[in-house]
Image (cartoon, rainbow, N blue to C red):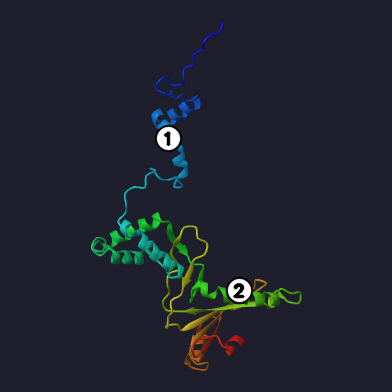
Amino acid sequence: MPCLILVHPKGGTTGKVRRRYAMIEKIMAEELGIHKSLLSRWKKDITRLRANKKLRKFAIVDGPNGQLHSIEEELLQWIFARREQGISLRCTLVAFKSSSLLRSTFGPKTFNARYKAVQRFMRKHKYVYCQRTNEATRAPQEVVDEATDFIVETRPLLVSAHRDPRYIWNMDQTPLSFSYQSSKMLAKRGIKTVNVRKMTDGMKRATAALTVTAAGYFLTPMIIFKGRPNGRIAKKELPTLDPTSIYACQEAAWMDERCMLM
């Protein structure tokens, strides 16, 4: 004789199933002082919690809009354009730019208030101060072809059995100025290359020539001052300088053939 078997759905008519916790969960909740209802709420939001990359945040919500929210896109485009050109960027310049865009609301605030607001804005968009890695008077896009051609032409001359690395020299000259620009500027967090365009400065009065061989040996540094080769500076001042370097004078403080032979 057939019999009828009734299967009751989980949760009854309401469909609500009572959440049961394992022993280890109960122990952890008790030790950490977390209520079971709070644990249950966290488990419901586990997907959102794992998707959030800022693990140190205290809340998933983004919070209220900042003071620069109305000009966010325009300001980010201005920052991106300057960084693409290799122009040095700091929070002070961003604060001045923001003040010019929001003259009536943001401009009248104190400089400290504007500076703090810009710092929060840059931190939100993952801009931090980075040390420069490349410096040039032109944009990197303009010199990449020249650098590539130089490498293609020079490498076969250096990689050869009859080349001694002790006699392969790499010399570079750097100007010594009275004023120097900062070596740090704003860039995206995690960026590997920070390009900066140098300021054109007419106050250069000396040039430092630094040389290293392919074998890893450093030659004696040379410093070239602006002056006549047999003038007063060369005769009276150069002999009194530190003898650990080579000194010379040239009319424009440049490395010419005479200084190269020295």
Label 1: how many Cα within 10 Å (few below 14, some 14–19, many 20+)? few
Q: What amino acid type should be assigned to the residue bearing mark 1?
A: Trp
- 136 above or below 90? below
| Residue 212 visible here | no
Instruction: Judge left or right: residue 210 versus residue 206.
Output: right
Closer to us: 7 or 248:
7
Which residue is painted at 32% across and 52% down in the image? 65
* Mark 2 crowd level (few <14, some 14–19, many ≥20, 10 Å Cα): few
Q: Locate residue 129, reporting x and y percent.
A: 43, 62
- Secondary structure category for the residue under label 2: helix
Depicted 135 relative to depicted 42: above or below: below
In the rendered view of the protein, which quadrant contains the C terminus?
bottom right
Q: Residue at x 52, y 64 (%)?
A: 193
N-term-proximal mark, 2 vs 1: 1
Q: Would you identify the image quadrant in which residue 150 lies?
A: bottom right
* Above or below: residue 233 compared with residue 178: below
Q: Which mark is residue 113?
A: none
Residue 136 coordinates in the image, percent (x, y):
50, 74
How many angstroms separate mark 2 from mark 1 (CA)?
55 Å
Q: How many marks?
A: 2
Q: Which residue is mark 2?
A: 148
| Circle number at residue 42 | 1
